[in-house]
Amino acid sequence: MATTINSLLGVHEQALIYRSKRAEVLASNMANADTPGYKARDFDFKSVLSGLNTPAAHVETTHSRHIGFDKTPAAVSLAYRIPNSASLDGNTVDAQVEQASYAENAMDYQTSLRFVNGKISSYLSALRGE
């Protein structure tokens, strides 16, 4: 059943999950804008999403001692953001950059959500025979 749902919604199901994770990371950055020594973090959404479709992402463990491939949002490797200007207290958060990134991520989240909603609505109307 899960394979059927994945094929119906395409990449948007995973996109929603990882956009949500990125929103948490960006919100954490904004919340720590005044914390001395805090280093802003983020991850490259496109590379994470494209990595889900690689053959390594579909590895199955057939033995209890096999090492699995973790493709959950918690396993995303966060990178430190390079600041545009140096801060005296060592904080690398640029509030305007974080707000712009957060707004862009929120718009992309809404786009994927609307796409999924449209797909589900069209499947429901097909099931109803409309």
Image (tube, rainbow, N blue to C red):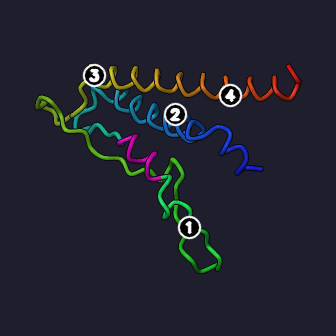
Nearest to the observer: residue 63 or residue 30: 63
Q: Residue at x 34, y 25 (%)?
A: 101
Separation (CA) of disc 4 from disc 3 = 36 Å
Could you say where residue 98 lies in the image, as x and y percent from the top left?
Answer: 31, 25
Three-letter residue code for mark 4: Lys
Could you say where residue 93 lies in the image, as x and y percent from the top left?
Answer: 25, 30
Relative to 89, residue 51 above or below? below
Please tell me which of labels 4 and 1 falls first in the chain: 1
Mark 4 vs mark 1: in front:
4
Could you say where residue 22 lies in the image, as x and y percent from the top left?
Answer: 44, 36
Separation (CA) of disc 2 from disc 3 = 19 Å
Nearest to the observer: residue 56 or residue 61: 56
Identify the element where label 1 is drawn.
Answer: loop
Identify the element where label 2 is drawn.
Answer: helix
Range drawn in magenta:
44-51
Please tell me which of labels 2 and 1 falls first in the chain: 2
* Disc ID at residue 59: 1
**Can you identify the residue that label 2 sits on?**
20
